[in-house]
Amino acid sequence: MKNKWISVAGLLLATQVFAADCGESSGWLDKSCRRVSQIWSEGQTDIYIPGYAYHLRSMYSAEKIASFNEHAWGFGMGKSIVDEDGDWQGLYAMAFLDSHNDVEPIAGYAYQKMLPLSENWQVGGGFTAFLTSRSDTLKNFPVPGALPLVSLQYRQAALMMSYMPGSKGNGNILFFFTRFRY
């Protein structure tokens, strides 16, 4: 249990962006530093509500599916901006119940190219890069990851989804959550 709380604290600290002295060059490291600092200092607050983890039925036995928790309830917070191109970029930290009913913390950066469907509706596609920690993977040691990310947004609310790829009996999960900006 102690390791789990250390992992949660470490992941939450990973989202803290202190007043960094970002360089002025056009290199990717300096530009990334400036963008992260901008999101943290100018971004709007986001609330994340994880909700459902759908395990692809064709990749698991019926017995294994029955053993999984697919109600991935949890909570998270973040900060985000709509950049000069109209795309969404954010920093976040959340925790939710994983497939085994264990708490899984996650913290990271997300980017989505946003396409307007109407005045109030948008669809987005992009990626997230993150640190997470699972009880069944390296005994809660934080591990990095990157996954695709899509969304359907109405005004300040978005239904978001990510896909965790895998092989037969592992991964292959559609993870659904909501984001509310205020």
Image (cartoon, rainbow, N blue to C red):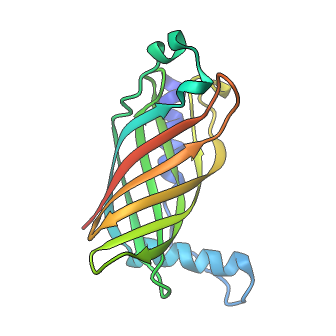
Quarter of the picture containing the C terminus is: bottom left
Task: Left or right? Give the position of 64 relative to 47.
Answer: right
Q: Residue at x 61, y 75 (%)?
A: 33
- 126 vs 160: above or below: below
Q: Residue furthest top?
A: 63
Task: Left or right? Give the position of 32 relative to 5.
Answer: right
Q: Percent x, y for residue 13? A: 50, 52
Q: Residue at x 67, y 85 (%)?
A: 23
Task: Left or right? Give the position of 175 relative to 59.
Answer: left
Of residues 108 and 67, the one nearer the viewer is 67
Q: Quadrant of residue 108?
A: bottom right
Q: Percent x, y for residue 120? A: 27, 75
Q: Percent x, y for residue 20? A: 57, 75
Of residues 38 and 177, the one nearer the viewer is 177
Q: Percent x, y for residue 106? A: 50, 44
Of residues 120 and 25, the one nearer the viewer is 120
Q: Quadrant of residue 155?
A: bottom left
